[in-house]
């Protein structure tokens, strides 16, 4: 199974596991948050209920303490053996200070009323029903008082009033004894409503709904804020009095909200919402990161596929020179595996031993931060089997996402095949050049025969005349000696002339290795001049040569440059081979020029006064095998441009004023003339 297939099968399982973990995490967090909110609500409910219970207990304590103070005040009414009238006055003052009491009675031991006083704050309670209807409760309270030998209470009862309403009252009986003998009773009637309004703190009545209730929940008296909300906190406290028991009930006017009981629960809920929001953002970020990881994995797979398909070797190194990455093309190039190369430092195993010092020095310069040339540089590597091969290295800094250089990235091209092709191309060009020279000699064979006939005919004539003079014997030597000497000199001159023509053709045709040397431009022109003059005489062309003053020597392969000059001259003379051109002039000029800011260049120009070059021909003029002549091969100008460019120059053409075309090429100078 391939790595890609294994990765494809592992992705669904990893995705399912990740989703399961996230689901469990979300459920746990939601459960925890719900539990926190519920516990916070319960805690706050318990706090409210506990505070309500404490307030109810304090309210009962306040009522009981007030009842005890009232008992003491009632006992004080009997101080000094008062008369009914004086007692009534003191009782009125007492009732004016205690609104919770609606009636105070002084009774004798037979339960007959000696004196009584009603509260000044309301209509007498017993005016409508009479005091006799409540006699049983008073008797019960006093019976309890005799039994307890102290204050006692009877159960509460309802007394209707004249206004159609009523009041719930509570009877207190206080026995009056002197020297252990019962002398009577003090009976005080409490209004439970006024007890709630007068004896409890205003804070309690303002914040709670407070009431006295019976054991079954029946309300006897009610005071405080009305109910609010659907649910009310309730606290009940028993107020155990001598002879009876009352239930004090407090209802909180503040209902318990379902969501936010108070600030703590709200805070917990807000934090829970924030946590859920953070989880949602985290989930969103995780999804984005998962997508980014998925895209990155696809990008890495795409990049690896591209790197594996490259024929260019790639190698990455850190700033210490250790190899951190190689692609398959590089491993195939050097014959080592990536395991053998990764982590390797200098010297690299693919460095030839004879170049280790040179390469280490070059790498030290590179690791110091010096940028390599953008076009790259050539080097020689060694395969694992020991064979050498040339490579072109292109290096660039390796920059991370933070913009910091972490090493160097290098690209390698095996240029062995390129060098082989270049060598084949060079050999082919030399063969083509030799073939072109031979073709040129073949075309000029007839001209050479005509040119050689002249010196040979002259030699033949001078030789025949000399033989005729010598036939007269020794006398002829004395008589015609000067003429014979002149004839021999002419024969030698004509023979030398014929030899130069033949030698120039031989040097032109002979194939040899390219050897560049410093040659004077005048010598180049003189070397081709005999061959140029041959064709010039045939086509009636006047050859004109101009060499600038103090021109230096030119550094070139003499034979190849002579061929360029000869080809351009022949093309120029053939361009003027038209019937309507009477004055035919071939101008060959040499001068010094400036190229790229440097004056170490010479310009050669060959100009004619022909019909010029048509625009459609100009685009293809230097293409191989393109020619406008039926007998031409189309290689002359192409070879000329190749030769000039191999010397570092350039070959161009432009119109010649007033008519014709001028071909111009440049060559570097050699030694200064």
Image (cartoon, rainbow, N blue to C red):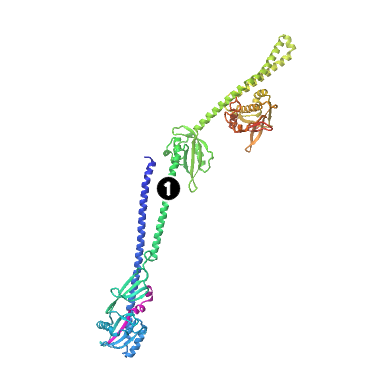
Q: x, y percentage for residue 168?
A: 31, 79
Which residue is situated farthest in the left direction here? Answer: 147
Judge whether 343 appears above or below 437 on screen: below
Quadrant showing the C terminus: top right
Query: Which sits in the foreground, 320 or 492?
Result: 492
Please tell me whether mark 1 sits on a helix, a strand or a loop: helix
Quadrant showing the N terminus: top left
Which residue is situated farthest in the front direction here? Answer: 164
Q: x, y percentage for residue 445?
A: 62, 20
Identify residue for label 1.
293
459 lies left or right of 280: right
408 lies left or right of 31: right
Q: x, y percentage for residue 636?
A: 60, 28
Residue 326 visible to the viewer: no
Q: Which residues are magenta?
A: 184-207
Judge whether 234 appears above or below 273 on screen: below
Decide whether residue 263 is among the magenta residues. no
Q: Residue at x 43, y 48 (%)?
A: 292
In which image quadrant can residue 46 be found?
bottom left
Judge whether 245 appears above or below 544 on screen: below
Query: Which sits in the foreground, 625 or 445?
Result: 625
Residue 202 visible to the viewer: yes
In which image quadrant can residue 169 be found?
bottom left
Q: Residue at x 44, y 46 (%)?
A: 296
Q: How many marks?
A: 1
Q: x, y percentage for residue 183?
A: 27, 88
Decide whether residue 195 is among the magenta residues. yes
Q: Residues within 10 Å of mark 1 (few under 14, many from 20)?
A: few
């Amino acid at each position: 199974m391939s790595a890609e297939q294994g990765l494809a099968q592992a992705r669904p399982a990893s995705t399912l596991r990740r989703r399961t973990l996230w689901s469990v995490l979300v459920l746990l967090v939601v459960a925890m948050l719900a539990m926190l909110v519920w516990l916070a609500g319960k805690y706050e409910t318990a706090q409210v209920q506990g505070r309500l219970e404490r307030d109810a207990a304090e309210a009962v304590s306040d009522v009981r303490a007030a009842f005890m103070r009232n008992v003491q005040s009632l006992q004080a009414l009997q101080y000094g053996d008062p008369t009914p009238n004086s007692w009534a006055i003191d009782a009125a003052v007492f009732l004016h200070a205690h609104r919770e009491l609606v009636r105070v009675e002084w009774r004798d031991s037979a339960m007959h009323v000696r004196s009584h006083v009603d509260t000044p704050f309301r209509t007498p309670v017993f005016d409508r029903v009479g005091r006799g209807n409540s006699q049983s409760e008073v008797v019960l309270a006093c019976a309890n008082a005799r039994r307890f030998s102290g204050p006692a209470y009877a159960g509460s009862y309802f007394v209707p009033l004249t206004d159609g309403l009523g009041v719930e009252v509570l009877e207190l009986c206080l026995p009056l004894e002197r020297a252990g003998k019962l002398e009577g009773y003090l009976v005080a009637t409490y209004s439970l409503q006024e007890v709630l309004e007068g004896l409890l703190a205003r804070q309690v009545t303002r914040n709670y709904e407070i009431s006295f209730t019976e054991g079954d929940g029946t309300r006897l008296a009610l005071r405080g804020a009305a109910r609010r909300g659907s649910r009310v906190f309730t606290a009940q406290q028993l107020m155990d009095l001598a002879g009876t028991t009352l239930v004090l009930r407090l209802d909180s006017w503040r209902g318990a909200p379902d969501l936010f009981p108070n600030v703590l629960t709200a805070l917990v809920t807000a934090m829970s919402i924030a946590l859920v929001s953070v989880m949602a953002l985290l989930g969103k970020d995780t999804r984005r990161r998962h997508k980014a990881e998925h895209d990155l994995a696809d990008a890495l797979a795409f990049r690896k596929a591209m790197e594996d398909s490259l024929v260019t070797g790639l190698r990455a190194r850190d700033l210490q020179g250790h190899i951190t990455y190689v692609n398959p093309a590089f491993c195939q190039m050097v014959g080592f595996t990536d395991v053998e190369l990764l982590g390797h430092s200098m010297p690299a195993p693919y460095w030839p031993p004879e170049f280790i010092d040179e390469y280490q020095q070059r790498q030290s310069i590179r690791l110091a931060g010096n940028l390599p040339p953008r076009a790259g540089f050539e080097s020689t590597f060694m395969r694992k089997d020991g064979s050498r091969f040339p490579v072109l290295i292109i290096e660039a800094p390796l920059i991370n996402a933070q913009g910091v250089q972490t090493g160097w990235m290098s690209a390698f091209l095996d240029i062995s095949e390129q060098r082989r092709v270049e060598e084949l191309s060079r050999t082919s060009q030399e063969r083509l050049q030799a073939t072109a020279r031979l073709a040129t000699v073949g075309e000029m064979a007839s001209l050479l025969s005509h040119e050689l006939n002249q010196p040979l005919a002259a030699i033949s004539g001078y030789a025949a005349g000399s033989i005729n003079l010598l036939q007269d014997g020794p006398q002829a030597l004395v008589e015609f000696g000067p003429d014979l000497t002149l004839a021999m000199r002419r024969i030698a001159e004509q023979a030398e002339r014929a030899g130069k023509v033949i030698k120039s053709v031989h040097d032109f045709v002979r194939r040899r290795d390219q050897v560049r040397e410093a040659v004077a431009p005048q010598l180049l022109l003189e070397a081709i001049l005999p061959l140029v003059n041959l064709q010039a005489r045939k086509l009636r062309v006047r050859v004109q040569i101009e060499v600038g003053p103090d021109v230096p020597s030119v550094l070139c392969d003499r034979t190849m440059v002579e061929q360029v000059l000869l080809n351009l001259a022949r093309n120029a003379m053939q361009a003027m081979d038209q019937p309507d051109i009477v004055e035919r002039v071939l101008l060959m000029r040499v001068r010094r020029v400036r190229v790229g800011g440097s004056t170490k260049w010479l310009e050669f120009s060959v100009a004619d006064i022909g019909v010029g070059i048509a625009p459609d021909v100009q685009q293809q003029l230097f293409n191989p095998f393109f020619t406008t002549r039926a007998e031409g091969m189309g290689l002359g100008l192409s070879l000329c441009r190749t030769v000039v460019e191999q010397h570092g120059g350039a070959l161009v053409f432009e119109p010649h004023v007033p008519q014709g075309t001028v071909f111009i090429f440049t060559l570097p100078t050699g030694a200064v003339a």
